[in-house]
Image: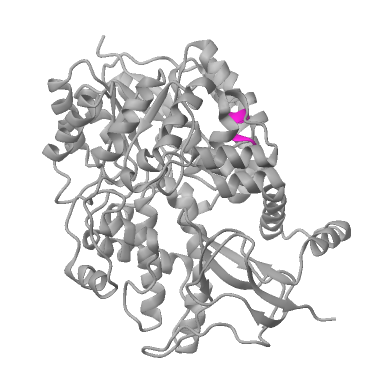
Amino acid sequence: MGKKIQFSLVYRDMWQSSGKFQPRKDQLERIAPVIIKMGCFSRVETNGGAFEQVQLLAGENPNEAVRAFCKPFNEAGIKTHMLDRGLNALRMYPVPDDVRRMMYQVKHAQGVDIPRIFDGLNDIRNIAPSIKWAKEAGMTPQGTLCITTSPVHTLEYYSELADKEIEAGAEEICLKDMAGIGQPAFLGKLTKMIKDKHPEIVIEYHGHSGPGLSMASVLEVCQNGADIIDTAIEPLSWGKVHPDVISVQSMLKHAGFDVPEINMDAYMQARALTQEFIDEWLGYFINPQNKIMSSLLLGCGLPGGMMGSMMSDLGGIRGTINNLRKKKGEPELSVDDLLIKLFNEVAYVWPRVGYPPLVTPFSQYTKNISLMNLLSMEQGKGRYVYMDDAMWGMILGRSGKVPGEIAPEIKELAKEKNLEFTDVDPHTLLENKLPEFREEMKKNGWDFGKDDEELFELAMHPEQYRNYKSGQAKKNFLADLQKAKDAREGAKVSIEEATAFKHAKADAIVAPVKGQVFWEFQGDGEAAPAVEPYIGKEYKEGDVFCYIQAPWGEFVTVPADLGGKLVEIGAKQGAKVRKGDVLGYIQREA
């Protein structure tokens, strides 16, 4: 019998790579025993990354969901693991040291065994502290190599990073092939290099299916010493997600490896339950494109985990771009047309911003630069016109050191804007914040929760947690769900629902999140400025009022509510607004 290979089910990532939301607590409680009954998983990814944030956005308590999902696996002796973004912890932007340190204490208490600690720039300065804090909390730290294919990401580059992570205390190494563009032969050689030098280190491979290389990569890494393979299950496997455990098990079994058997009755039950969750509500937020594999991903290198948000962003900005093209007498772009343009622009931008591995948040930053470039070029303004602090932060070194060189034209642009590059350790730029959040909890009379988990949630996701506590998150979610159902099914809301919806809307159009305002651009000349909406402009119900780029990178579409005439403008193009700020006033028709 050959080498023993174990399987991990990335149930959280399956959903993130498919759509916007995660299953509710009650749904996770239903699926967990069935996953255990399948008998083939030694590990399950239970939370981390987008899990926490999107549960809050749905008006649900993520701490209760994590505890409920972990408990049966803990009792069954199945290891649980979570995704940890290093300097960014569980969110899209940097987290102070005291909050990051607290995360491991809270997550260990909730039943999570292993944090998969990665940094989007592979900067050891952002990874080593997390390894230390995870060990102190009693967890098993897994150091991560964010895999991509570029001239600077060599075998020696990754081997040296693995050495540094192991020296910092990592007990395992994950090859995180987040876009599935890692070349199989390369990954096999890298696995062997690490195993030859560190035979005691567990190696886990995580590869998305997107461009179609992952199955070959699975075989290569197993033949060269890998121990654990991340897999998915239907109906969310393949596409932009991960290979299905049935196919992986079959391939490795016939290659002579010692692999666990799969209880197919339980598999079919888990498959049916997952489909039930999709049909009930989660499917309304899954873009069909995310079920399709595409070799085009090899060129741009974008990861499967951000495809849901990317398709939403494309849909939001497509109308603006097509309005510009219409005024110029040019044909409109379909979603596919715009997708190809975006992929090509990412391939252009990526080397010029220093080849950051395209994983959260730097995949979003690179994608956002490219997306806004498409818009500014359509306006005749050229590239790099709309770049916010987060995008510049990546370029200037405030989030860590990019692996490659920044292009001369971007350096020159930074100089023109009086922006300075830095090589300072990123976490030293952040002040501790827990005392402030403790005071906020006390002032509001909020329960700190078991093991201070509610305090942690506020500190990690302040905006989303406040919305959750006020009940606004649930209202927003239900409104989004109704819109999604109407769009998908052509359904009509009841008179009672419509009346309640109207009563909930005021004439003031307010920012649903904090971020940077982008109005619907109307510039149609060579250096024509973006024209903001004018007083008296008419909107129909459902029209786009503006876009806000949120701190976590997503472009949020702000609707004009029930429509009417614009009577006041509250924010200028590019203005930074807080959640709740008035963007404008629309007077409804009598």
Left or right of 187: which side holds 305?
Answer: right
Which segment did they paint magenta? 60-66
Query: Is residue 521 a member of the stretch shown in magenta?
Result: no
Seen from the viewer's position, the closer of residues 141 and 399 is: 399
Residue at 19% over, 50% down: 403
Left or right of 67: which side holds 446?
Answer: right
Query: Is residue 64 a member of the stretch shown in magenta?
Result: yes
- Magenta segment, prevailing SS (helix, strand or loop): helix
Which part of the image, by quadrant, shows the N terminus? Answer: top left
Q: Position of residue 565 (x, y in %)?
A: 72, 83
Quadrant of residue 35 in the image?
top right
Which part of the image, by quadrant, shows the C terminus? Answer: bottom right
Seen from the viewer's position, the closer of residues 191 and 427 is: 427
Q: Position of residue 367 (x, y in %)?
A: 37, 59
Residue at 46% over, 31% down: 103
Q: Position of residue 135 (x, y in %)?
A: 35, 21
Name the colour scheme: one colour
Residue at 23% over, 71% down: 415
Residue 103 lies, with reference to residue 227, above or below; the image says below
Left or right of 234: which side holds 365?
Answer: left
Q: Residue furthest top?
A: 1
Residue at 26% over, 34% down: 217
Whether residue 494 appears in this view of the structure is yes
Quadrant of residue 257 in the image?
top left
Q: Position of residue 100 (x, y in %)?
A: 42, 35
